[in-house]
Amino acid sequence: MRKMLLAALSRVLQGPAAARTGAVSEVAQVVVASRTYADFASEATFEIKKCDLHRLEEGPPVTAVLTREEGLHYYKTMQTIRRMELKADQLYKQKIIRGFCHLYDGQEACCVGLEAAINPTDHLITAYRAHGYTFTRGTPVREILAELTGRKGGCAKGKGGSMHMYAKNFYGGNGIVGAQVPLGAGIALACKYFGKDEICVTLYGDGAANQGQVFETYNMAALWKLPCIFICENNRYGMGTSVERAAASTDYYKRGDYIPGLRVDGMDLLCVREATKFAAEHCRSGKGPILMELQTYRYHGHSMSDPGISYRTREEIQEVRSKSDPITLLKDRMVNNNLASVEELKEIDVEVRKEIEEAAQFATTDPEPPLEELSSHIYCNEPPFEVRGPNQWIRYKSAC
């Protein structure tokens, strides 16, 4: 590398003008290529926004340490989710994806920050805006997109679609508003019953926060001291209704009353990570449930049938993008603190785009499941039985 640099410099000094121009470019390329990992800082410490507290004497730290390795991993994960959702939007508009579809772009810091703070053996259940969590829980992009297009290679064999995706220790993807909250408490009860050092992260939106079953679940979880983190992803709009018009109290982190709560900047991955670590430790120590409100924002409409601009302005969306975008925030932190270079992050962007295109190719060419599989995967570990088809003369065999 040193010899290449010296040779290029020699051509700059000795050659004619045209040769000097080419040699200068060559020198620049050599200098960039010669930058090694030793040139970057291994970690950096950042100040993060203080959380609002309810029934807690102290909360999460107001500083967070980010290593270079963690930063690159978080950046790639968030960028993958963003590109995956944009590709889903494109496929939907091409009528390749049909039915319900709720996109997660803008909220990436929530799912990535949460996953960074819990263990793979912990449990997670969410509502129907589930693509990001399906990915962070370990499902490849190609299986997510193939599920959206209803293909055999989808993570639910093409039978679940956007709202019903599952993975190990990930329970969906639930279509009924708020219904996943009592299910999450049930998972937490199982964790406690079997004496495992595991917790359940139970997510819902600001729209579901007004459901009666949510408050019933708070009560049972507090009585039984269940290891459950209840998380309200407050993206400011339940469908097309702003939180101010839908709720007499928008302090969702106080809704548990007797359950401690935190209000967190959901656009800052580090803030989400540190708050979730704090909440997880609270649950594991036997103190019972805790409630978190993540203040976040979705860029797309509620679903694909919602243009997202009839109840909010384009200027509002653009302002959030320019001032609070979670990916841009992480990128700026890393570049400004010498944890990564702009060129390195651009390389990740190119790699992510290629992965998404390959996944989309798979999702549009993989075969659809045959009609005979309609009755499969109804029950687990049950002997085969007959299932009636569209009429009484058509029968299908079930299979696990």
Image (spheres, rainbow, N blue to C red):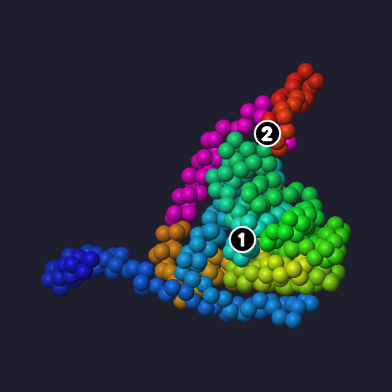
Q: Earlier in the sequence, mark 2 or mark 1?
A: 1
Instruction: Tell me which amino acid carries mark 1.
Output: Asn
The local crowd at label 2, few if under 14, some if 14 to 19, many if 20 or more residues have their Cα within 10 Å, is few
Residue sticking out furthest to the top: 393
Q: Is residue 321 visible?
A: no
Left or right: residue 19 versus residue 267 is: left
In the picture of the structure, the residue carrying the numbered disc 2 is: 400
Per the rendering, the mark at residue 355 is: none
Image point (85%, 65%), residue name: 223
Residue sticking out furthest to the left: 14
**Image position, residue 125 (x, y; %):** 71, 54
From what the image shows, is residue 377 above or below residue 310?
A: above
Q: CA distance from mark 2 to mark 1?
A: 29 Å
**Image position, residue 161 (x, y; %):** 67, 43
Image point (46%, 69%), residue name: 68
Query: Residue 360: within the magenta?
Result: yes
**Image position, residue 309 (x, y; %):** 69, 59
In the picture of the structure, the residue carrying the numbered disc 1 is: 119
Q: Is residue 233 visible?
A: yes
Main SS, magenta region, reads: helix
Residue extent of the magenta highlight: 350-379
